Structure formats: structure tokens, C-alpha cells
DNA sequence: CAAGATTGAGGTTTCAATCTTT
DNA sequence: AAAGATTGAAACCTCAATCTTG
């Protein structure tokens, strides 16, 4: 365990993990108390709401929010049960399943989107807008 | 769902989540196959190995790796069971419990530390050293 | 066989409540 | 009452295997 030379890659993994955990706990807790949603739930609604065609294949949804295909299936189930999203088939390819917002889902997304802005702003208050944009730029390179 | 004005705070939360998920899946999978450790397990060993006194209170460990006190208790249990860490009492205060590396734990940490550098480097290859340092600087502000 | 999606099994983490010690 | 730590219950997510369709 040497005090060691600079290891930017490792330091980055360390701090990315820590800041992510801290930030997500804040977002989850506030979003849950306001709308009964986890941040991941919100991300799903948001991705569907901003998709050009209003619907998204499960694979693309997985890519968009950064979880596995399995994770998407499991996250979608309870959202479908409470009628926030619905599943649609594809006329051309019987393998693919789309997910889309229901009217109720659209309403909730609208409200949650209004709530989340100040929550995110407060949770990231330690950084200026410019710094946030810089961080976004850097992290985007990583996610591909 | 308006295409909306710039919302750097929200965009940041989005991309932080996505890049974290992607990065952690890589680290976990490679670390698991090489040493049977999750990245969080490694983080615990690393934090204990670099602590000045060689031991850390559970609360401080939680702070260091960004999980709750509960999470620390549960992560430590299996590591103690396979004799990588041991628990020590505090002579002054019977409430606090320290965690410290065993000789076996120190060995494994040494080996895992050697493995993890190239893994982290590869997983963050999309960024230059300078960019990584910049990202570390920004994220550190967030974690406090 | 490849792609999209789901399921079974297992592991992880959180919240809230609780216990002990200060 | 506050601080450190643990536990029960529940939620969540992954991997690997499987099923169906192309």
C-alpha cells in the first residue's frame, strides 16, 4: 500500500462511485416522497416522454438509462401494473416489445419533471452551471 | 414534454447515473473473475489499507465509500467470514466497532491493487489523464 | 445461429426500527 | 436524547439460462 503516484483512472472510479451513491440517495428519497417514484422509474418515464415516436423498444430503453435488458423488464412491470406505461407490439417483428406512456403516465411525468428540477439543482449546488456542463461533457464521452 | 431549455443539473444527474452503471458493471465483472471481489469489497479493503492507523470505524468507512451504515455492516460480514478483515473494539467507547485488514486481507489488497490499475485505465480510456483529473476535481466538490 | 425479451436464482443496498452505550 | 451499530423487510439489479421469432 504505497501512498503511490497519481492514478487518475482509479481516483476517478472512486469518486464517481461515491458521488453517484450520494446523489442518487437524495434524488430517490425526495422523488419517492413526492411522487412515489424511484429515480430509475422517473428515468424510464422521461425516456419514453422524450422519444420522438412516444415509444421505445426495451433494448433501447435499457441503453438509454444504463441498465441491462433484464433490469428493464423488471422495472417496467410495476409501472405497467399501476397503469403508468403500457406495452405495444411491433407489426413487423414479433420479437420486439415497445413501452409507451399512458395518459396517466404523461400526467405524472409532467408533474415529476417540475419537481425534479429544483431537487437536482439543490443536490448539485456545489457546482456552477458551467462546471456542470463541463462534467456532462466529460461523462458523456465515457458512456459512449 | 417540451424539448426544453438547458437544464445542466438534471442532465448531469442523468449522465452521472448512466456512466456510473456502465463503469461499475465493468469493474465488478473483471474484479470478480480475478479475485472474487466486488468493486465495493475492494473499496473497503482499500480504505482500510490506506487508513493511517490501519483501522476505521464503521461510520467513517461508510462515509469513505458512500454507502449507509447499514450497508457497511452487511458488506463487512462476508469479508469477515472469509478472514479478509477483522473487527476490533474501542477501549474508550464500547459503541464503536473498528474494522481492520487481516494479513490475508493485506495480501489480497496488494494483488487486487495491481490488477485494478489497468482495468480502471481501460474502462476510462475515452478520457485523457487531464480530463480524468478535471472530472475528479469536479466530482469531489459534489461529494463534499 | 442471432436478436429481443423474460425468468430463476442470488446478491446487494436501502429505510425504518431497535438495541446498547454515552 | 444522541451516536454507533445491527436487523427485518422490501426493493432492486445482475448474470446465466431459456424461449420465441427472424
Image (spheres, coloured by chain):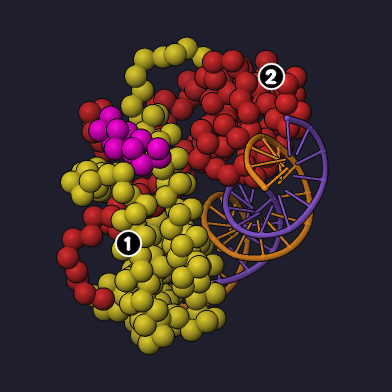
Chain colours: A red, B yellow, C orange, D purple
Compared across the picture, whether A60 is left or right of B15 comes to right
Looking at the picture, how far across and down is residue A92, in whole percent? Answer: 73, 21
The label shown at residue A102 is: 2
Q: What element carries label 2?
A: loop
Q: Do the residues indicated by labels 1 and 2 lie within the same chain of the protein?
A: no
- Specify few, some or many for label 1: CA neighbours under 10 Å numbering under 14, 14-19, or 20 or more: few
Residue at x 36%, y 76% (from the top left corner): B111
Image coordinates for residue B128, horizontal then vertical, percent: 23, 46
The one nearer the camera, B82 or A51, is A51
Q: Specify the segment rendered in magenta.
A: A133-144
Task: Report the magenta stretch's main SS.
Answer: helix
Q: Which residue is drawn at 19% across and 69% down?
A: A4
Between C21 and A130, the one lying in front of the other is A130
Would you place residue C5 above or below residue C21 in this image?
above
Secondary structure under tag 1 reads: helix
- Which residue is painted at 34% across and 19% down in the image? B6
- Count of numbered tags: 2
Q: Is residue A114 left or right of residue D18?
A: left
**Measured from the top left, where is residue A36 in percent x and y?**
61, 34
Instruction: Name the subunit of mark 1.
Output: B
Q: Name the residue under label 1.
A: B118
| A115 or A49: nearer the viewer | A49
The residue most toward the bottom is: B103
Q: In this view, does D4 lie above or below B110?
A: above
Q: Distance between the residues labelled 1 and 2?
A: 46 Å
Answer whether residue A65 is visible to the viewer in this image: yes
Q: Residue at x 60, y 17 (%)?
A: A54
Image side of residue C3 versus residue B98, left or right: right
Amino acid at each position: 500500500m504505497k501512498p503511490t503516484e497519481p492514478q487518475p483512472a482509479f481516483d476517478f472510479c472512486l469518486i464517481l462511485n461515491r458521488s453517484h451513491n450520494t446523489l442518487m440517495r437524495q434524488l430517490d428519497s425526495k422523488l419517492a416522497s413526492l411522487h412515489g417514484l424511484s429515480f430509475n422509474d422517473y428515468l424510464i418515464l422521461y425516456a419514453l416522454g422524450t422519444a420522438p415516436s412516444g415509444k421505445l423498444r426495451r433494448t433501447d430503453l435499457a441503453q438509454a438509462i444504463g441498465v441491462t435488458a433484464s433490469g428493464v423488464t423488471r422495472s417496467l412491470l410495476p409501472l405497467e401494473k399501476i397503469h403508468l406505461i403500457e406495452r405495444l407490439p411491433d407489426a413487423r417483428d414479433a420479437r420486439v416489445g415497445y413501452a409507451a406512456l399512458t395518459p396517466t403516465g404523461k400526467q405524472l411525468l409532467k408533474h415529476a419533471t417540475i419537481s425534479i428540477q429544483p431537487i437536482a439543482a439543490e443536490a448539485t449546488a456545489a457546482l456552477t452551471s458551467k462546471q456542470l456542463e463541463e462534467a456532462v461533457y466529460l461523462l458523456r464521452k465515457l458512456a459512449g
